[in-house]
Structures are given as structure tokens and as C-alpha cells.
Image (cartoon, rainbow, N blue to C red):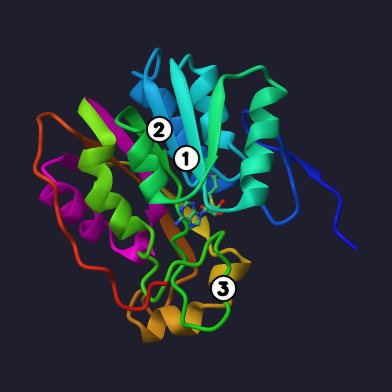
Amino acid sequence: MTAPPMLVSTKKARVWRMPGVYRPQEDSFLLAQALREAGGSRDARVLDFCTGTGFLAVTAAQLGAGSVTAVDIATRAVLTARFNARTRGLPVRVLRGGLDVATRTGPFDVVLSNPPYVPHEGGPADPRWDAGPDGRCVLDPLCDEMSNLLSVNGFALVVHSGFNGVDATLDRLRRGGLKAAVVARQKIPLGPVLQSRVRYLRHAQLAGQDATNEEVVVIRADRTRPSDNVDCAPREGCR
Ligand SMILES: C[S@@+](CC[C@H](N)C(=O)[O-])C[C@H]1O[C@@H](n2cnc3c(N)ncnc32)[C@H](O)[C@@H]1O
């Protein structure tokens, strides 16, 4: 039997969630807070890539975005995000797909993303959070594509774990001609998924021997000028 839909109480909103859709949590809240602090979303064309329930898309629309496009690969997430936007009367366009769909519908003044980023040893993967051996299977292509997704003077806010390597994200974004910096950090206790991966994280040297917390970071990237396309090879271990 399928579990009933749930109402998730977040710090700023209650969003409906179909079973199997990622529940907004600390990483989602940290990114939403970074968006509020960044300002600049009024009248902006906003992309929420990897939208899940649409929590960030709804937040951007409530902050006065001119238009919001939300993209997710999972049908249940798309249906959930549509429901959460429509029941609030918010103009959010929700599309099913990946980075190619996002790129085709851009450029955007603001790009938000809380992608899957949990390092995964192999075997069955959960696309809500698992993202290859170093957790960068969605992050890296997103960073490489960011300069094409953003309009000139646009900015992106991307959240992920310190276990994924913050410098790797900053380097990739800068290689695409963007300015990039960490704008928010929060230490949180390891959740059940990461706890079950601690041995792997240590073995892969993604975490130290005493890892009981993870640091979640929000990285901001700014496109200040037209930039060249970056052509990057597909990554090993990614589906
Ligand atoms: C960590 S959840 C974040 C959900 C939401 N943004 C939030 O903060 O609550 C990641 C989401 O990315 C989606 N996803 C995974 N791989 C994707 C891909 N290649 N392209 C688009 N969406 C993807 C998953 O279905 C999931 O809904």
C-alpha cells in the first residue's frame, strides 16, 4: 500500500509532499535563507533545478520573482511541486527533466539548486540524494553549465555538503568564467543516510576518522560578463 501524502512543516512554509519526494530540510532551509539575504529575486527569472517539492521555487515566487521555472527528473516531484505552486496561486512552471531541459528554457537571472550530493559506493541508488562515488554526479555538470544557465549579471546559489569538496565546486564555477564564493555554512549532525555511509566516506577519504557532523555550504556564483562555453568530459561512476 502506498503511504499517504504528507504535510511537511518547514521553518517558513508548509509544503505538501507525495511519498518518495525529498522532504525539505536543513540544506533546503539554508539555501532559502541565503536567497532571502541575497535579495535580487524581485522580478527576476528564477530557475530551481532539482526542485523536489518545489519548496525553493515557491520561496522564490513568494519573494516576488517575475517567473519561476522548476525542474526535476522525478515525475512525483513534478506533480508535488505543481500542486504546491498552484494551491498558493503562484506562477511556477514545473518541468520534468534534467540539465538539458533547464538549459533549453534559460537563461535565468537567478539559479537555485539543492541537487543530490550524497557520496554513494555503488549498488541501488536513490536519485533523491545519491550522486555517485564523490557525490558530484549532478553537481559537476551543473557547475560546468552554470555560465550558460545564467544571464549576464545573474547569480546562482547552490547548496551541498563539505564532504563533496567545496574547492572543487569553486574551481569548476571559476573555470566557467564565474565569480564564486561560499556565502553560508551550517554544521549539522549526520542524518541516517550519511551515518550508514560513514565507513565508505572514510575509506574514500571524503571524511575524517571522527566525522559526526557534516558541514552544509551554500556557494554563490556570479556571472559578470559573457563567458565561453566549457566543454567537460562525462564523469566516471555517474549514470
Ligand atoms: C536533495 S533533493 C532537493 C529537493 C528540493 N530542492 C529541496 O531542497 O527540498 C534533490 C532532487 O533532485 C532530483 N534530481 C536528481 N537527479 C536529477 C537530475 N539529474 N536532474 C534533475 N533533477 C534531479 C531528485 O528527484 C530530487 O527531487
Q: Quadrant of the N terminus?
A: bottom right
Q: Amino acid at mark 2?
A: Ala
Q: Which mark is residue 34?
A: 2
Q: Residue at x 22, y 60 (%)?
A: 168
Mark 2–mark 1 Cα distance, whole angstroms, equals 6 Å
Q: Which residue is mark 1?
A: 30
Q: Residue at x 59, y 53 (%)?
A: 74
Toward which corner of the image does residue 40 lie, by quadrant? Answer: top left
Q: Is residue 213 magenta?
A: no
Q: Which residues are magenta?
A: 153-180
Q: Which residue is mark 3?
A: 195
Residue 142 x, y percent position in the rendering: 32, 51
- Mark 2 or mark 3: whose residue is earlier in sequence: 2
- Mark 3 or mark 1: whose residue is earlier in sequence: 1
- Tell me if label 2 and label 1 are in contact, CB under 8 Å: yes
Residue 169 x, y percent position in the rendering: 25, 55
Q: Residue at x 29, y 63 (%)?
A: 165
State yes or no: Cβ of the residue under disc 2 lies below 8 Å from any atom of ligand 1: no
Q: Classify mark 3: helix, strand or loop.
A: helix
Toward which corner of the image does residue 119 lie, by quadrant? Answer: bottom left
Residue 120, visible in the rendered structure:
yes
